[in-house]
Image (cartoon, rainbow, N blue to C red):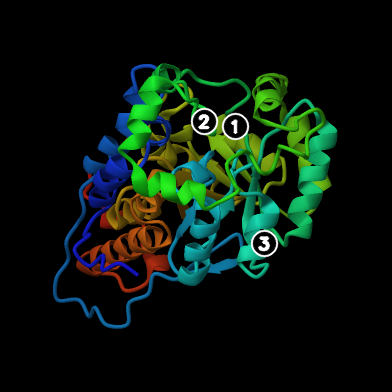
Amino acid sequence: MPDLSKITCIEDLRVIAQRRVPRMFYDYADSGSYTEGTYRSNESDFQRIKLRQRVAVNMEGRTTRTTMVGQDVAMPVAIAPTGLTGMQHADGEILGARAAKAFGIPFTLSTMSICSIEDIAEHTGRHPFWFQVYVMRDRDFINRLIDRAKAANCSALQLTLDLQILGQRHKDIKNGLSAPPKPTIANLINLATKPRWCLGMLGTKRRSFGNIVGHAKGVGDLSSLSSWTAEQFDPQLNWGDVEWIKKRWGGKLILKGIMDAEDARLAVNSGADALIVSNHGGRQLDGAPSSIAALPHIAEAVGKNIEVWMDGGIRSGQDVFKARALGAQGTLIGRSFLYGLGAFGEAGVTRALQIIQKELDITMAFCGHTNINNVDRSVLLPGTIPTL
């Protein structure tokens, strides 16, 4: 295990990941759609929220432990589903799931992952994890995907609602994003500067979309995969599909991609167990508000009728603390996790989680609290709370 004690913040991990991960995959993780305005505001809007520092408060016996859909968690943080994770680092989803298991937080596997559902189950001793699914035209494939998730001991299903069509990310087009990378001159030159990454990829057989290739009809290799995915995301997705997924799954259901109070109320009516205030990391509708700006209005609209979580822009434990104060029972991290993975593999993911938890713990103490479950809006400075 490398000594990562001098890695003190998520930004340290980001800088190292940018140096170690091939350009097309680093840019895939670290980019937004069109002008990237929403992507940037996800982070910057957190910085405008100010905290009330309190003194002469007993700070002993602090705990960041809480629950997310009834599951005990070491802190109100889960790893978000991220596509192509296994291209940030060889076997990336397996490494992330192992780190999450050891730390005591949930890991979510994306449908568009490199490692398969079965890979995660095998390499974590069938420890419960969450699985994210899209509504696709091939309903038979979705049925089989849900059955595979049940067989792998997944304890919750995340249904992503904001990817019926793809937002345009300029960097992906310019880089010719593919898995594995296309052997263009530019990509080969870039890969030559990433020997650690290349060595890791040579040592694994997992270089494609493990949940799809060999499972979806007519998809046996990467050449057939691209045409399949272009046709499969279903633009006709509606709340009837949510009802069908919930019934078919039968377990805990989490709806990801809610950015409007009206949609939040519909999520409550659907019978889902939790919703995630999320703009897909600024990768879909550029010009949408940041997730943290949308959170208070949505949390107020649904009250205690459903668990409200959020993702987008979380780069510190202070961000988690602010989200909790504004009504989020839990949060999810995507890029913060990927930076750690790209920088140092499993050890990097663990370090990212350690950084976030320590920041959360210290911030909570300085704001006069010892239990994360007692944190509310009173810890924030009036006038700095975001409004839509």
Are the residues flagged by discs 1 and 2 in contact, CB closer than 8 Å?
yes
Q: Quadrant of residue 76?
A: bottom left
Question: Which of the numbered marks, if any, corresponds to residue 260?
Answer: 2
The residue beneath circle 3 is 121
Would you say residue 57 is visible in this rendering? yes
Question: Which of the numbered marks, if any, corresponds to residue 263?
Answer: 1
The C terminus lies in quadrant: top left
Work out which residue is located at the far left of the displayed protein and give it. Answer: 55
Say which of 276 and 57 sits in front.
276
Q: Earlier in the sequence, mark 3 or mark 2?
A: 3
Name the kind of residue labelled 1 in the image. Asp
Name the kind of residue labelled 3 in the image. Ala
The N terminus lies in quadrant: bottom left
Q: Which percent across, then down, holds residue 367?
A: 23, 64
Q: Is residue 283 left or right of residue 225?
A: left
Name the kind of residue labelled 2 in the image. Asp
Q: Which percent across, then down, holds residue 91?
A: 53, 52
SS type, badge 3: helix
SS type, badge 2: loop
Q: Is residue 50 left or right of residue 358?
A: left
Q: Quadrant of residue 230?
A: top right
Q: Is residue 276 left or right of residue 149?
A: left
Q: Quadrant of residue 372?
A: bottom left
Q: Which percent across, then down, holds residue 57?
A: 20, 76
- Mark 1 → mark 2, Cα distance in angstroms: 5 Å
Q: Earlier in the sequence, mark 1 or mark 3?
A: 3
SS type, badge 1: helix
**Neighbour class for label 3 at 10 Å: few (<14), some, many (≥20)?**
many
Up-down relation of residue 139 to residue 21 (above or below): above
Say which of 240 and 220 sits in front.
220
- Mark 3 → mark 2, Cα distance in angstroms: 35 Å
